[in-house]
Image (cartoon, helix red, strand yellow):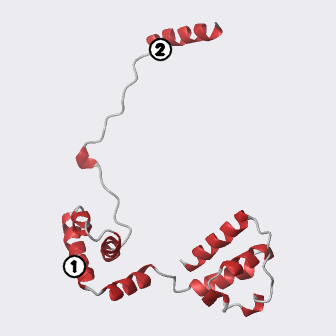
Amino acid sequence: MDVTRVGRVLRKARKLLPARKEAPRAPVAEVTLPALSLPLERIALVVCVLARERAADLLGGLVDAEAGRALRHLERFAAMPSAQRQAKVAVGFGERADGASRLALFLETAPEALRQEALRGLPPYHRSRFPQWEGTAPRADTAPALTALAERRIREALR
């Protein structure tokens, strides 16, 4: 019963208050899109690899000047042999140039449990770079959260 009274009081109070004014909407011409964060060549490469059939349509939706340049990049990537295109993707979106040093810094500063889990999850190529920790035995009862953290820190160091 108290709820009903409160509701009635609020409705009466709303009638006494002046109507809310809506904020004016910005005209379409004033709205600007953010600048592209990736170079057009990389955007065209990603679109060529992930959506090859629709690539021209997707890149055609860019601003006119950028769409023309992006379509030229797309034509160049489409003309490449598959192996060369895959190599370009690996170089463009692969490991960082300083990834090995960042990984070493992470492993040196990590607590022992995290270091052991990270070493267990490293690919053989990277694991061979750290022979000083190769003799440590991995723990069998590792928490899933620790495994996820180790995987994430490895990805952050290498990418």
Residue named by callout 1: 75
Q: What label sits on residue 14 in the rendered view?
A: 2
- Residue at 49% x, 8% y: name it: 12
Along the viewing direction, whichever of 87 and 35 lies nearer the viewer: 87
- Residue at 18% x, 65% y: name it: 64
Q: Is residue 90 above or below residue 66?
A: below
**Label 1: which secondary element:** helix
Along the viewing direction, whichever of 123 and 27 lies nearer the viewer: 123
Q: CA distance from mark 2 to mark 1?
A: 62 Å
- Residue at 27% x, 86% y: name it: 80
- Residue at 21% x, 73% y: name it: 71
Along the viewing direction, whichever of 129 and 31 lies nearer the viewer: 129
Q: Is residue 10 left or right of residue 93?
A: right
**Label 2: which secondary element:** helix
Q: Where's residue 10, x and y in %?
A: 53, 13
**In the rendered structure, which amino acid carries the disc numbered 1?**
Glu
Query: How many marks are shown on the rendered structure?
Result: 2
Q: Is residue 84 above or below residue 46?
A: below
Q: Residues within 10 Å of mark 1 (few under 14, many from 20)?
A: few
